[in-house]
Amino acid sequence: MVDKQKKIWVDGELVAWEDATVHLLTHSLHYGVGAFEGIRAYKRANGETAIFRLDDHIERLFDTCKMVLCQPKFSRTDVSKACVDLLRANGMSEGYLRPLVFVGEGVMGIYSANNPIRTAVLAWKWGAYLGEEALKNGIRAKISSFARHHINISLVKAKMMGQYTNSVLAKREAKLAGYDEAIMLDVNGFVSEGSGENLFIVKKGVIYTPDLSSAILAGITRDTVITLAKEMNIPLSETRITRDQLWLADEVFLTGTAAEITPVREIDDRMIGEGVPGPITKRLQARYFDVVKGSDTSHPAWLTPV
Ligand SMILES: Cc1ncc(COP(=O)(O)O)c(C=O)c1O
């Protein structure tokens, strides 16, 4: 359960949590067209709160809006400011931010050119997405029987609401079968991503991750990891990955704003490497946490103070 907070930002106003409701005729509730983001604010080692890569998340939100033809009434600056204002109004020194841009009530047909485009930002407290134990010791994953969307069936670069039914089905399947997370292949059988995370493997000291032309979300944590790996002189290649490469990898880890850097210790009942988080995963995870909430300030542009 999400812990109730004081306020939610809705169309330019900070309203009481319990008053932030929508009508059942809300178009997005029926057809799923709309954009959302997931952003984390951390309390850093110096006691100050900073939102991690806020500008990049807001840029992806507006990119999704562009792709799904939902033009928000608010500017990027307005939505960024809403994120900061909301954390302050709720007295939150850390938490998860969820901007939403959705189609409101009006026409109920599929074509809804004149329905209002509504914007909201929610915030709640969210610990480790897959659990503290997962961050420390890794998770067990299963390759899903559901394929990731084909690039011409949906908009894989969009963080579009309705698209997540694909992730929900895959995640449910994996959990019901006793695993922690689903790994999805694309329609051609190449490794794509987790239900809500990008995927990396390590083999003989080199990191591999699917390239951006594949059916993956352009994850901001993915980009952070690529940047940090370069800085740490760890070789990295963006390329296609097959299921057998995944099973035979020395290390596998998933990345996401929610999942942060989560090691994978087993896939489809095959142990990955030694069955424990590997050295490169551990180095990157330590550096990541130092950047997002520790004392590493080498990327000031990634930190928006609250
Ligand atoms: C399908 C999918 N892939 C990857 C990611 C990771 O993206 P990010 O690192 O920007 O949170 C997410 C989370 O937003 C996601 O939902």
Image (tube, rainbow, N blue to C red):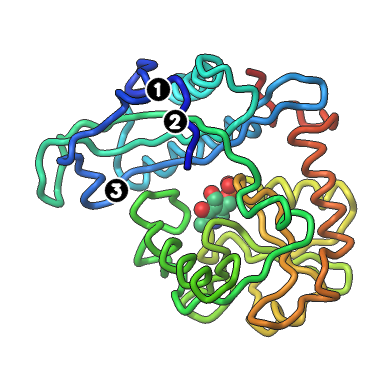
**Residue matched to label 1:** 9
Is 132 left, or right, of 23 in this rendering? right
**Disc 1 vs disc 3: Cβ atoms closer than 8 Å?**
no
**Residue matched to label 3:** 33
Instruction: Residue at 57%, 70% (x, y): give it.
Output: 183
| Residue 43 in which image quadrant | top right
Is 139 left, or right, of 60 in this rendering? right
Front of the two marks 3 and 2: 2
Instruction: Residue at 45%, 24% (x, y): give it.
Output: 79
Q: Nearer the viewer, residue 227 or 126?
A: 126
Mark 3 nearby-residue class (10 Å; few <14, some 14–19, many ≥20): many
**Residue matched to label 2:** 122
Q: Amino acid at mark 3?
A: Val
Question: Distance between the Cα atoms at labels 1 and 3?
Answer: 20 Å
Q: Could you say where residue 161 lies in the image, as x and y percent from the top left?
A: 37, 49
| Residue 237 in which image quadrant | bottom right
Q: Could you say where residue 190 lies in the image, as x and y percent from the top left?
A: 57, 77
Instruction: Residue at 58%, 59% (x, y): give it.
Output: 212
Q: Amino acid at mark 1?
A: Trp
**Disc 2 vs disc 1: Cβ atoms closer than 8 Å?**
yes
**Disc 3 vs disc 2: Cβ atoms closer than 8 Å?**
no
Question: Distance between the Cα atoms at labels 3 and 2?
Answer: 18 Å
Q: First in sequence: mark 2 or mark 1?
A: 1
Instruction: Residue at 74%, 19% (x, y): give it.
Output: 48
Query: 223 above or below 173?
Result: above
Mark 1 lies within 8 Å of ligand 1 (Cβ measured): no
